[in-house]
Image (cartoon, rainbow, N blue to C red):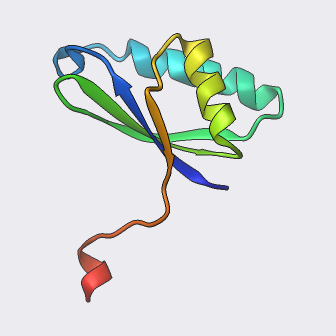
Amino acid sequence: MPKYIIERNIPGAGDRKDNSGAVNSNKVLKEMNDEGKNIHWQHSYSTQDKIYCVYIADSPDLVMEHAKRLGAPADKIEEIKGISDPTTGE
């Protein structure tokens, strides 16, 4: 399955202290999985005004559907074509 990175513009995202976004995201993912839709959240990174989320899904449309059901922005969805880390250069 393809892997996607989602950019969410959320002012003050870096100041959030609760985990309600993750809890609600998991609820929506369970609903979608129960409907037979293949989408999985791997992890997210927060900056001051943005959240970057990594998902594995059959299509970018499923990622957008998840965002809409969640009521969260998905300002940019890009398919990840490669991953590099320190071991890549060894």
Q: How many numbered dots are placed on residues in this image?
A: 0
Q: Residue at x 29, y 13 (%)?
A: 18
The image position of residue 32, as x and y in percent, is 73, 26
Q: Residue at x 72, y 21 (%)?
A: 31
Q: Nearer the viewer, residue 2 or 39?
A: 2
User: Which corner quadrant holds the N terminus?
Assistant: bottom right
The quarter in which the C terminus is drawn is bottom left
x and y percent of residue 65 in the render? 65, 24
Q: Residue at left 43%, top 26%?
A: 75
Q: Position of residue 82 (x, y in %)?
A: 45, 66
* Looking at the image, residue 31 lies above or below residue 52: above
Question: Residue 9: image x %, image y %?
Answer: 32, 22
- Residue 88 horizontal side relative to residue 33, left or right: left
| Above/below status of 63 relative to 56 | above
Using the image, determine if residue 8 lies above or below residue 24: below
On screen, residue 12 above or below 84? above
Q: Foreground residue, 18 or 66?
A: 66
Residue extending farthest to the bottom is: 90
Taking the image as shown, residue 14 lies to the left or right of residue 56, namely left
Q: Is residue 9 left or right of residue 29?
A: left
Q: Is residue 24 left or right of residue 66?
A: left
Extreme-right residue of the structure: 36
Residue 47: quadrant of the picture = top left
Query: Residue 64 falls in which quadrant of the image?
Result: top right
Q: Nearer the viewer, residue 69 or 24?
A: 69
